[in-house]
Each structure stands twice: as structure tokens, then as C-alpha cells.
Image (tube, rainbow, N blue to C red):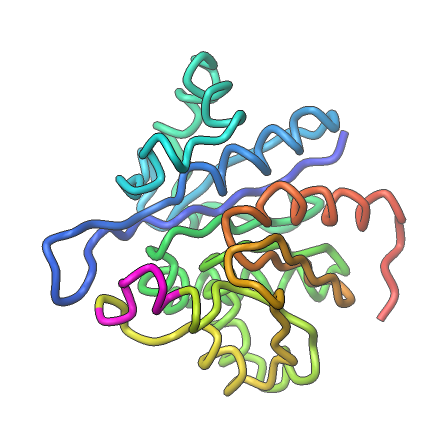
């Protein structure tokens, strides 16, 4: 049985506002059930362990997905989310792939977490896929700083500068993720229209642009795993 690690943010504060952020719930539940329904085992971790903060906006009616509703009736999944493992206790050798959901939180903690950066490099060294969606690709930043050139020329997508502006949160974040990834050498790609599904697979990296891309990104990672040996 394949074993997937899902790494979530532990960060909730935003800049210049009393509003909070954290995990975007649908970006966890859509991939989580995608992996579970494919017969995979899932382990959940976060920098601080325990229950991660949930972005309140992801709980609004207009942002609720079918997987959110399924989660609301799934006591086992709720218990797993409430008791995430502490990230620095995780060993890449125990897993077949890693996936990073978004919410704005990863811009602060996962992007700057050296243990997380080294964990990603271990997955890459072992030829294991690394998936991320929306602001989840911020988790790649520290890995790319530790291994310059890691993202050079690699097709990556993430929440775009335009989408940040349209969500009215551009003044509440430390940097724009699209800009940061481009500076690290990524060949950044996005959908023609904001907030529409867009997924990129390049080598070991699978990235999705926004919440609508969470389920498709998980399916792309599953497809990569099913191919077996992954070549450069």
C-alpha cells in the first residue's frame, strides 16, 4: 500500500489585519479523499503538530466542496486532522510521496522551515513525487534555497499574483508566491482565467494553481505514482 505524507501549515496570523488564515480546508479534504479512495494510507503532519488553524473563509458556504461535507461526517478523518504529527519527527523513507495543501499559512512557516526544506530534498533524492496546491508550493522555497537550481526551468504553478489581488489579501502577505518562485528559477505557468483549474507535472513535481486544482493535483500525483520508476 502506498503511503502519502500530507504536510499542513501551523500558521494563522496575517499582516496588517486582524483576519486570520491557516489551512484552506478543501485543499486538504479534496486530496485526502483522493488518496484514501485510491487505496493509499495517509499520514498528516505540521510544523507544530496537533490541530492546524483553518482559514475561516474556507468554511464559508460558497467555498464548501463535496469533500468538505464528507469530512464533516468522518470522525476518523477529523481525529487525524486534530492530531497531526510534529513535522520534525517525520522521515521521508517512510513515505512514497508528499503533498502540501495551501491556505496562506505556508507563506510564513513552511517556506522558512529548514527541516521541511531538507525533507523535500530527501524525497527528490529518493525519486519520490512532491505535490502542492495553491499556496502549498511555498513549501518548496526553503528546499530551493538549500539546493540552488532545484526549481530552475521546472514548470511550477501556484496561486498567482492576479489571484492575490482579486482576493484583496495582497497587502496582508509577506510576498507574492508567483514572484518568489520565478526568482528561484521556476518556469511559472497558470491558467488563462484566474480561479480556474490548472495543474503542472514536471519530473517529480506536481503543482496546482488554486483551490479548484486541489483534487486534480492529487489525481496527477496518483498517476505519477502509478507509473512506477520516475525518470528525470
Q: Is residue 212 magenta?
A: no
Q: Point out the image quarter for the N terminus.
A: top right
Q: Point out the image quarter for the C terminus.
A: bottom right
Q: Which residues are magenta?
A: 164-171
Q: Quadrant of residue 199?
A: bottom right
Question: Which residue is drawn at the image coordinates 49% and 57% (left, top)?
Answer: 134
Residue 182 point in image, percent of width and height: 54, 83
Specify the principal SS of the magenta part: helix
Q: Is residue 148 left or right of residue 21?
A: right
Question: Which residue is drawn at the image coordinates 31% and 46% (left, top)?
Answer: 48
Question: Which residue is drawn at the image coordinates 10% and 54% (left, top)?
Answer: 18
Q: Quadrant of residue 57?
A: top left
Question: Which residue is drawn at the image coordinates 45% and 59% (left, top)?
Answer: 135
Q: Is residue 155 left or right of residue 49?
A: right
Residue 125 point in image, percent of width and height: 71, 66
Task: Please say if 110 is above or below 24.
Answer: below
Amino acid at each position: 500500500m502506498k503511503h502519502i505524507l500530507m504536510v499542513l501549515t501551523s500558521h494563522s496570523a496575517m499582516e496588517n489585519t486582524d483576519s486570520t488564515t491557516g489551512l484552506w480546508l478543501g485543499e486538504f479534504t479534496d486530496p485526502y479523499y483522493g488518496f484514501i479512495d485510491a487505496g493509499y494510507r495517509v499520514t498528516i503532519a505540521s510544523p507544530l503538530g496537533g490541530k492546524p488553524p483553518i482559514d475561516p473563509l474556507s468554511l464559508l458556504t460558497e467555498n464548501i466542496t463535496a469533500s468538505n461535507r464528507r469530512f464533516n461526517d468522518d470522525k476518523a478523518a477529523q481525529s487525524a486532522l486534530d492530531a497531526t504529527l510534529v513535522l520534525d519527527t517525520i522521515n521521508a523513507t517512510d513515505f512514497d510521496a508528499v503533498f502540501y495543501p495551501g491556505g496562506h499559512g505556508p507563506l510564513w512557516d513552511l517556506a522558512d522551515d529548514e527541516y521541511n526544506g531538507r525533507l523535500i530534498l530527501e524525497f527528490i533524492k529518493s525519486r519520490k513525487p512532491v505535490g502542492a496546491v495553491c499556496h502549498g508550493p511555498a513549501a518548496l522555497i526553503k528546499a530551493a534555497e538549500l539546493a540552488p537550481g532545484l526549481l530552475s526551468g521546472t514548470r511550477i504553478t501556484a496561486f498567482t499574483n492576479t489571484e492575490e489581488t482579486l482576493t484583496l489579501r495582497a497587502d496582508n502577505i509577506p510576498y507574492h508566491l508567483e514572484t518568489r518562485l520565478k526568482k528561484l528559477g521556476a518556469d511559472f505557468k497558470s491558467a488563462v482565467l484566474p480561479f480556474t483549474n490548472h495543474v503542472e507535472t514536471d519530473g517529480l513535481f506536481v503543482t496546482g494553481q488554486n483551490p479548484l486544482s486541489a483534487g486534480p493535483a492529487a489525481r496527477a500525483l496518483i498517476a505519477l505514482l502509478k507509473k512506477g520508476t520516475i525518470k528525470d
